[in-house]
Image (spheres, rainbow, N blue to C red):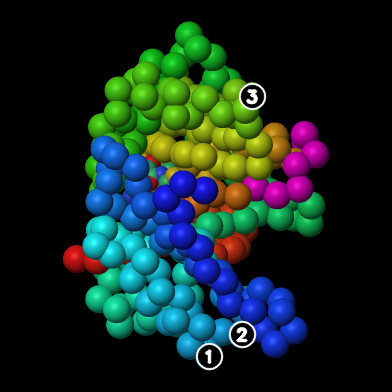
Amino acid sequence: MDGVLTTAARDPQGTVVAAASVRHQPPPAGGRATATGLVDPAVRGRGVGSHLLDWALTAAAPAEVTVETESLTPAAERLFASRGLRQVFAKDVFRFDLGVAEPPEVPFPGGVMLAEWSRDAAGRFFAVYSAAFRDRPGFPGWSERQWVDWLTDDEEFRPDWTLLATDGQAGDVGFIGCAEGWVVQVGVRPDWRGRGLGAALVVEALTRMRAAGAREALLDVNVNNPAGALYRRLGFTPLGRRARYAAP
Ligand SMILES: CC(C)(COP(=O)(O)OP(=O)(O)OC[C@H]1O[C@@H](n2cnc3c(N)ncnc32)[C@H](O)[C@@H]1OP(=O)(O)O)[C@@H](O)C(=O)NCCC(=O)NCCS
């Protein structure tokens, strides 16, 4: 592939046990490169990862490099730190096993009604999303159009699992957005937090997914977001940590 360098490590039998790649960005983002790599757990702790990382940093130079991983381990954290890389982003991926466990019962706060996604209601969804996420670090400040495209321009988007919660008096107070097998986003208006609405929305989506035959539900959440505790309490288990590192 254009602008992509790869390397692999094999064991004495010739089986690939580790691999890394560096992708140099084309203009206008030229001067930047993204590196990623994977080491088979069976050969970890033997310096293979250090070797691959050093290869990647050399292959990326002189571009400004970002190192991405889908499965951050404590050893990888130490390795990145030892090369002067700084964590710029980290998300935990959580999984709910719909094949084994039934979602817990969580009632909606009294007076809350649900409506499924429709284009006509996009502006109302967007208003609740903005109110819920405005105070999160890294809030992108997208326009309604950008956010709606991000959420719905996906073959896997599920309008019937994407729900707006409306209170008879307070108006629109929360929402959840889902795709096939994924809880994409959940948000509750700040003045409505702590009443069980977030939990009820997640459980409602899980229940709909299970009724449709889905085996699992995944979601990811920033490691510094207290919502992680909510997902654990509902029965999600951590699958792994995605992270991105950059040279200062
Ligand atoms: C996460 C969120 C949807 C939870 O909604 P909610 O209606 O307050 O959730 P519930 O009342 O069902 O549960 C509250 C739980 O959420 C967790 N929580 C999440 N954010 C919290 C916050 N800002 N302050 C306190 N608790 C928070 C706590 O673990 C709390 O657990 P507890 O009930 O055991 O104390 C809401 O805080 C929110 O909109 N946050 C901003 C958007 C966001 O980060 N969404 C999740 C990432 S996709």
Q: Which residue is mark 1?
A: 46
Position of 224 relative to 172 (above/below):
below
Is residue 110 shown in magenta?
Answer: no
In percent of width and height, residue 55 lies at 41, 74
Q: Is residue 46 left or right of residue 55?
A: right
Q: Which residue is mark 2?
A: 43
Q: Earlier in the sequence, mark 3 or mark 2?
A: 2
Is residue 214 shown in magenta?
Answer: yes
Pick the front one: 110 or 50: 50
Residue 209 seen in the current view: yes
Residue 233 seen in the current view: no
Crowd band around label 2 with a 10 angstrom C-alpha radius: few (<14), some (14–19), many (20+): few
Residue in the picture at 46% in, 39% down? 186
| Contact (Cβ within 8 Å) of mark 1 with mark 2 | yes
Q: Which residue is mark 3?
A: 160
Crowd band around label 3 with a 10 angstrom C-alpha radius: few (<14), some (14–19), many (20+): some
Amino acid at pointer 1: Arg
In the rendered structure, which segment of residues is drawn in magenta? 211-217
Q: Is residue 52 left or right of residue 128?
A: right
